[in-house]
């Protein structure tokens, strides 16, 4: 008899499992629908120094500040260069921890080079020391879209952003914006977007930040922002989207009167010149370390030369083999060259991250943020946990702290913005509903089982079961 009796149990168990499974499936559906997620767009205007806003009329920036938040002083990551600082923004890590320590790198462990100039940056190994926020967002079940953010077209931890544009600097600003908006508006929308624009960095290098021609460049960026805001309004995204407009670093004025020529102090055959001015990574040839270091140590009053192990702790720029054994750092406004035939630029950055000229802008706007609120300062590593909070994802280990920037959010409670509160209410409701569903089916299941067990195999049951067996 027993094989006949097990059959209804089996089908009951299957149906119980099925209902439980369906019940559990409905759980996330209650509180994880994609359009209910907080939307976030992170924008970087490369090299936008914090005080550029005071030089010309910037109506679009002004309107965003008035209805959002502004941070006056952002302490960015050392060295204050494009790749390290952009990776800090999306990982919350200092350069020594995220591994993108410069725009030009050499890693002795793998004997490979990384160069922004040659764009040989696509090997995952350079980026895999950290997890960028778009990867975590996708692991949290969401979708990300990146318009040319540095590193966003590289496979990192086995993943690209859900959508991304291959880096091509000739792609117009408007095209990048349109692409992002279409991703946000798609039937399978992204909840997180990243937008990168090369200006005003390019002009800053070429003209020098003190050049009055920079005023037109800043006005142009304000128009770019205006275009973005218009398009967000037209697509209905403006009121529901959280927008962070920031940058990687500032810019300082150079002069040919402030040049340090290394050839005057040390034979260039004794070392390899890895990263360029104003913070030069120097790799001495085998056995020539002391010779090179001693020659450079007190060579010039406007150049500080560090052995890697004596780099100041506050730089968080020591514990990574991609940081070269000797680091030569110029004083603000000074350029380090081998001799004057090397490339010279009128504007540059990379200096000490305590220098005001190296600091970027920071403005945020949207439902998650307070309105007309100004904050004195923040660390750029704190943006990452703030973004994770808005996106509702768990941050990877990082050097930042949400508590440092919690006051930027619309409600300064441990739960953060209003949306987060609503989300947590709905997730509680979802949990209760799901639990009730599971308990309900459990009761039905137990009832069914006990009904089957009480009668000692009634004939009716066998009769019901037998046709099934024969089918
Ligand atoms: Zn630059």
Image: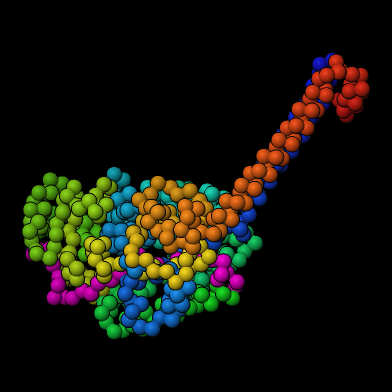
Expressed as whole percent of the image width and height from the top left, the position of residue 183 reads 57, 64
Quadrant containing the C terminus is top right
Asked which quadrant contains residue 464, the reply is: top right
**Of 438 and 125, which appears nearest the observer?**
438
Residue 457 at least partly seen: yes
Q: Please give the range of residues in magenta.
A: 235-264
**Is residue 87 visible in the rendered structure shown here?**
no
Q: Is residue 89 left or right of residue 427?
A: left
Q: Is residue 257 left or right of residue 118?
A: left
246 in the magenta segment = yes
Above or below 239: residue 284: above
Quadrant assignment for the N terminus = top right
Q: Nearer the viewer, residue 40 or 161?
A: 40
* Residue lying at 14% horizontally and 57% vertically, measured from the top left: 305
Q: Percent x, y for residue 108?
A: 26, 47
Residue 134 on the magenta segment:
no
Find residue 213 and report its image quarter: bottom left
| Residue drawn at 38 percent across, 52 percent down | 401
Residue 440 falls left or right of residue 62: right
Who's the residue at 37% across and 56% down the image? 404
- Count the marks: how many? 0
Say which of 267 and 281 sits in front.
281
Instruction: Relative to 327, say whether 470 is above or below.
Output: above
**Residue at x 22%, y 51% (from the top left corner):** 313
In-image side of 304 versus 226 (left or right) = left
Q: Position of residue 56 (x, y in %)?
A: 35, 83
- Vertical side of 208 occupied by 6: above or below: above
């Amino acid at each position: 008899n027993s094989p006949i009796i097990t059959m209804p149990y089996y089908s009951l168990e299957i149906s119980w499992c099925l209902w439980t499974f369906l019940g559990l499936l409905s759980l996330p559906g209650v509180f994880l629908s994609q359009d209910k997620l907080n939307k976030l767009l992170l924008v970087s205007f490369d090299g936008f120094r914090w005080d550029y806003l005071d030089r010309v009329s910037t109506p679009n920036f002004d309107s965003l500040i008035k209805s959002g938040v502004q941070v006056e002083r952002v302490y960015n990551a050392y060295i204050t260069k494009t790749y390290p600082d952009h990776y800090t923004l999306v990982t919350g890590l200092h350069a020594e921890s995220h591994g993108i320590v410069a725009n030009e790198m050499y890693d002795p462990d793998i004997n490979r080079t990384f160069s922004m100039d040659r764009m040989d940056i696509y090997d995952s190994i350079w980026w895999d020391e950290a997890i960028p926020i778009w990867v975590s967002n996708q692991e949290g079940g969401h979708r990300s879209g990146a318009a040319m953010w540095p590193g966003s077209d590289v496979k990192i931890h086995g993943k690209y952003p859900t959508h991304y544009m291959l880096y091509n600097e000739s792609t117009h600003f408007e095209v990048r914006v349109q692409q992002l908006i279409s991703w946000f508006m798609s039937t399978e929308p992204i909840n997180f977007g990243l937008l990168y624009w090369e200006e005003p960095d390019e002009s800053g290098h070429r003209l020098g930040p003190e050049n009055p021609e920079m005023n037109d460049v800043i006005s142009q960026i304000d128009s770019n922002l205006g275009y973005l805001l218009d398009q967000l309004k037209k697509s209905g995204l403006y009121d529901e989207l959280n927008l962070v407009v920031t940058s990687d670093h500032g810019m300082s004025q150079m002069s040919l009167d402030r040049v340090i020529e290394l050839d005057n102090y040390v034979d260039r055959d004794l070392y390899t010149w890895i990263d360029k001015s104003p913070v030069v990574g120097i790799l001495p040839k085998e056995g020539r370390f002391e010779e090179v270091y001693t020659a450079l140590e007190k060579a010039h009053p406007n150049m500080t030369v560090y052995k890697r192990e004596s780099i100041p702790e506050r730089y968080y720029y020591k514990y990574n083999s991609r940081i070269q054994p000797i680091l030569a750092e110029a004083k603000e406004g000074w350029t380090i060259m081998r001799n004057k035939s090397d490339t010279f630029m009128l504007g540059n950055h990379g200096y000490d991250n305590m220098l005001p000229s190296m600091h970027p802008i920071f403005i945020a706007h949207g439902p998650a943020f307070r309105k007309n609120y100004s904050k004195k300062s923040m660390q750029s590593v704190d943006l990452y946990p703030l973004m994770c909070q808005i996106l509702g994802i768990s941050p990877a280990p990082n050097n930042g702290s949400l508590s440092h920037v919690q006051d930027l959010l619309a409600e300064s409670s441990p739960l953060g913005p209003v949306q987060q509160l609503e989300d947590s209410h709905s997730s509680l409701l979802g949990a209760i509903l799901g639990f009730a569903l599971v308990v309900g089916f459990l009761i039905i299941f137990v009832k069914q089982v006990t009904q089957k067990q009480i009668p000692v195999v009634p004939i009716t049951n066998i009769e019901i079961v037998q046709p099934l067996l024969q089918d």
